[in-house]
Image (cartoon, coloured by chain):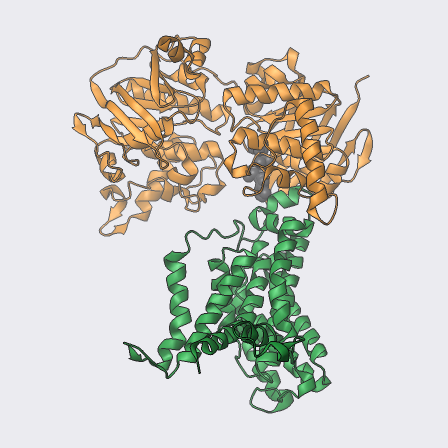
């Protein structure tokens, strides 16, 4: 196998591995830009993954699965909103609580409904999202360079992958070109300014959280209905937290978020690829080291290589008008 | 016949146990400038926020243009033509001027049209009222005077006929304040109604037609401005007679306590803020440093108190140098008898979340008086705080109360009590009465003069020219980082004003 094919393969898995990160990262972007910190991305993805796979296998429909994933994930986002917007609770505590509830309830319900040790039944072909083959793939496959790039990298992903990447320009457009985006950014910086301009701070933040819920729902559905043929307990495996790190790394900007997620996805792909392969000079690297690499890099990047990341100024602070 | 633009009838509002407004009645005549004065905490902002729909009154009625109005949200107020410039600006700092102006008043779901419309509308307002500001500038890069202009533009853009300004001059230089007043007069000529909240009585006399006075949540009087005096208003505000100018005898200046020589200080951007400044401060005198804010006074204070790094020069305290590398231990300076009341009491002088008694020893907590072995002697600290509360008339007289719950004037007294009661040889005070009520100003001034009469050396920096003139035995004027002149306390306001504006200096250079 030549080096070019290897690179294309790594890039291809980079894309696949970036997608859940990207969706979660954009999800976090909506709520954090609106001033609500959301450490519960992980939990919302997990319930989305479970609900999606469970509904798809029972209803025999990938689309109904996706819809259910979004619905449940939005419901969890609203719980976070109820605690932290309506009741001005601590956003971190509420987010952590959501992660615990998600981890516990998915296993419990999974076991109760399907009796497969917390798994959902393996999804049949029509119950999961299949790869889409682009026109002309077979014709160009033989063409050097362009061929493999088109047929491996661009073609052959599920619809959710394309949706995830289309969400990047879409989110940018929403944030910077629409009234909703202007208000959303404003409420994350100075909610009092939004309030005195005659706009409801609570309703605006709720709407932002609904956006978050939709995207984490899609992220979860991707994990259980594309990457995997069903739900496995704790299958998010910290991706929600990595997405949060990517969000900071991206300074809360959508296009940066895409690059940050691609980078983390690339490291993940690389670590999988290099497992067990001896490297020149260093020799064989333990699997655990390679798996830890993305996290190590996160810490290093966050500790100093990205310059000052200024979060939305009202982030994490409940809006209180009358003390 | 004069028509009421706004009538407030029997307004009540409580925040928990605090009754911020009790049974307020107020009528504001269309096409006039109506002043509302009152000490901090009198309930002025609360009343206006109710009118603007930001807070809901517990009871009472609002009429706009003679019609009963139900104002539940700022939107209702905006629809009735009421606009408000809040005391703390309601701007999104990292948005452009245009974005701030259209926020909440966008014409469609997409921004493009709204922005284009706002841009042409801003041009019109600029022509009509002389409200110039770059529509694409980012708010945080604008000086406060311009930020305030953006707030006014926001209100006018929404079609405000009645404009409420809450303490608009607190953050402005005298020249900016004058400019604001010209704009307000112009608005009045165009038939708009202006409500001006302030605690600076002189502004009230200069610009309003009618003035109402609030005290402790009640409306105590409404007067025609022409028929009242500053003295009467001050008395109504405080509820007793106040001396606006404290009496003091001649200074008996002794030996040099603090000698500043050729001091040069740069700020973090490398701009020279203090430029070759030299002066002496003697025992038994008050030296006042006058100047428009931002001419290096803050940096001078910080350098002298050892907080900020100085580029060159020296400062001698009792003949021994102060470490000017910016790494000086402020505790060491305190031990050497230099006490410092910082300009910004909220960020530097106090920990607002602490109890009053904790703040009253902050920085002196290593003093054996407050220690029992390695532990704090809580009883000693509280008794000490209680003494200070009595002596400085700090209200409420509760040393266990959280410091944030004291009014600005009382917070300032907490800092002053802490620093003065250590009996320092040199006292440096930045903005002694910023945000402090008339009644407390008198008290603080008397205290500073008493310090002087005990033979202490006192350095006062203030942007309030009145304060400098009534306190100081010698006045140094700072402009663009230099001391551009020294005058006696008899110097006229006009003369000092010219020095502060740097006029003298330019003439000398020619
Ligand atoms: N949002 C609030 N929550 C609780 N108490 C408040 C609030 N705003 C003002 N107060 C209290 O109400 C009183 C009146 O305050 P305010 O209207 O701001 O006075 P002023 O503007 O005259 O200085 C004060 O005792 C203040 O502490
Ligand atoms: Mg106020």
* B101 to A274, vertically: above or below: above
Extreme bottom residue here? A115
Residue found at the very far left of the displayed protein: B320
Please identify the quarter of the rendering in which residue B385 is found: top left
- For ligand 1, give the image quadrant: top right
Q: Which quarter of the figure is the C terminus of chain B placed in?
A: top left
Along the line of sight, which residue is nearer the eye, B319 or B48? B319
| Residue A130 at least partly seen | yes
- Chain identifier of the orange chain: B
How many marks overall?
Answer: 0
Name the side, left or right, on which A197 lies relative to B502.
Answer: right
Q: Nearer the viewer, residue B345 or A213?
A: A213
Q: Quadrant of residue B356?
A: top left
- Tell me if B151 is positioned left or right of B406 in this view: right
The residue positioned 66% from the left and 18% from the top of the image is B185
For the N terminus of chain B, the quadrant is top right
Residue A251 position, x and y percent, is: 49, 55
Which residue occupies 18% across, 30% down?
Answer: B321
Where in the figure is residue B154, as x and y percent of width and height? Answer: 66, 35
Q: Residue at x 60, y 37 (%)?
A: B97
Locate residue A106, reporting x and y percent: 59, 80
The answer, for residue B83, to whether it is visible in the render is no
Which one is in front, B158 or B259? B158
Asked if residue B182 is positioned above or below residue B307 in the image, the reply reads above
Q: Residue furthest front?
A: A143
Give the colour chain A carries in the figure: green
Q: Position of residue B224 (x, y in %)?
A: 68, 15
Looking at the image, residue A247 lies above or below residue B2: below
Q: Is residue B49 left or right of residue B399?
A: right
């Amino acid at each position: 196998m030549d080096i070019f094919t290897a690179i294309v393969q790594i890039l291809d898995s980079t894309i696949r591995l970036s997608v859940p990160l990207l969706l979660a990262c954009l999800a976090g972007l909506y709520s954090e830009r609106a001033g609500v910190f959301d450490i519960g991305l992980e939990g919302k993805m997990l319930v989305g993954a479970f609900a999606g796979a469970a509904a798809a296998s029972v209803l025999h429909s990938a689309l109904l699965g996706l819809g259910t994933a979004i619905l449940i994930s939005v419901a969890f986002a609203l719980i976070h909103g109820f605690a932290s917007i309506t009741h001005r609770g601590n956003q971190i505590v509420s987010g952590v609580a959501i992660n615990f509830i998600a981890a516990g309830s998915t296993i419990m319900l999974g076991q109760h409904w399907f009796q497969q040790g917390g798994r959902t039944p393996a999804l049949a072909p029509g119950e999961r999202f299949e790869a889409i083959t682009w026109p002309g793939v077979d014709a160009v496959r033989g063409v050097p360079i362009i061929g493999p790039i088109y047929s491996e990298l661009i073609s052959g992903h599920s619809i959710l992958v394309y949706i995830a990447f289309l969400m990047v320009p879409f989110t940018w457009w929403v944030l910077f070109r629409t009234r909703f985006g202007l208000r959303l950014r404003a409420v994350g910086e100075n909610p009092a300014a939004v309030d005195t301009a005659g706009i409801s701070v609570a309703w605006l933040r709720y709407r932002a959280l609904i956006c978050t819920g939709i995207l984490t729902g899609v992220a979860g559905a991707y994990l259980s209905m594309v990457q995997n043929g069903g739900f496995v307990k704790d299958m998010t495996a910290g991706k929600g937290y990595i997405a949060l790190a990517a969000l900071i790394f991206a300074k809360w900007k959508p296009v940066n978020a895409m690059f940050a997620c691609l980078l983390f996805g690339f490291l993940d792909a690389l670590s999988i690829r290099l497992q067990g392969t001896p490297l020149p000079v260093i020799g064989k690297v333990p699997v655990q080291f390679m798996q830890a690499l993305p996290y190590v890099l996160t810490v290093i990047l966050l500790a100093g290589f990205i310059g000052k990341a200024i979060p939305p100024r009202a982030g994490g602070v409940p809006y209180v008008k009358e003390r | 016949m004069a028509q009421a633009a706004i009538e407030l009838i029997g307004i009540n509002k409580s925040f928990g146990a605090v009754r911020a407004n009790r049974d307020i009645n107020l009528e504001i005549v269309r096409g006039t400038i109506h002043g509302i004065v009152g000490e901090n905490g009198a309930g002025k902002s609360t009343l206006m926020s109710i009118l603007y729909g930001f807070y809901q009154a517990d009871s009472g009625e609002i009429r706009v243009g003679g019609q009963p109005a139900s104002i539940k949200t700022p939107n209702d107020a905006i629809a009735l033509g009421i606009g408000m410039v809040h005391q703390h600006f309601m701007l999104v700092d990292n948005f452009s001027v245009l974005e701030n102006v259209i926020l909440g008043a966008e014409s469609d779901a997409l921004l493009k049209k709204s922005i284009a419309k706002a841009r042409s509308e801003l041009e019109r307002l600029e022509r009509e009222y002389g409200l110039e500001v770059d529509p694409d500038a980012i708010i945080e890069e604008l000086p406060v005077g311009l930020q305030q202009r953006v707030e006014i533009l926001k209100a006018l853009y929404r079609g405000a006929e009645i404009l409420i300004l809450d303490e608009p001059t607190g953050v402005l230089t005298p020249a900016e304040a004058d400019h604001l007043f010209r704009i307000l007069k112009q608005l009045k000529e165009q038939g708009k109604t202006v409500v001006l909240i302030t605690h600076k009585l002189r502004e009230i006399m200069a610009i309003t037609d009618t003035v109402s006075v609030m005290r402790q949540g009640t409306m105590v009087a409404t007067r025609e401005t022409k028929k009242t005096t500053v003295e009467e208003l001050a008395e109504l505000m405080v509820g007793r007679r106040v001396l606006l100018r404290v009496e003091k005898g001649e200074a008996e200046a002794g030996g040099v306590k603090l000698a500043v020589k050729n001091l040069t200080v740069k700020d973090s951007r490398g701009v020279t803020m203090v430029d070759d400044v030299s002066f002496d401060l003697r025992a038994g005198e008050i030296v006042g440093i006058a100047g428009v804010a931002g001419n290096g006074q803050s940096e001078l204070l910080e350098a002298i108190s050892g907080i900020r790094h100085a580029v060159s020069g020296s400062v001698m305290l009792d003949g021994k140098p102060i470490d000017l590398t910016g790494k000086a231990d402020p505790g060491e300076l305190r031990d050497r008898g230099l006490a410092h009341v910082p300009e910004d009491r909220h960020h530097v002088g106090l920990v607002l979340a602490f109890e009053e008694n904790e703040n009253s020893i902050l920085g002196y907590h290593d003093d054996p008086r407050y220690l029992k072995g390695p532990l704090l002697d809580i009883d000693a600290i509280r008794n000490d705080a209680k003494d200070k509360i009595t002596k400085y008339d700090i209200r409420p007289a509760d040393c266990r109360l959280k410091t944030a719950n004291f009014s600005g004037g009382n917070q300032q007294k907490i800092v002053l009590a802490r620093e003065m009661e250590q009996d320092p040889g040199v006292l440096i005070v930045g903005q002694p009465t910023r945000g402090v009520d008339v009644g407390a100003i008198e008290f603080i001034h008397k205290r500073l003069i008493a310090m002087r009469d005990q033979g202490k050396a006192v350095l006062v920096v203030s942007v309030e020219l009145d304060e400098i003139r009534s306190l100081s035995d010698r006045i140094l004027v700072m402009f663009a980082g230099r001391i551009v002149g020294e005058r006696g306390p008899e110097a006229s306001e006009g003369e000092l004003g010219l020095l502060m504006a740097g006029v003298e200096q330019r003439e000398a250079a020619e």
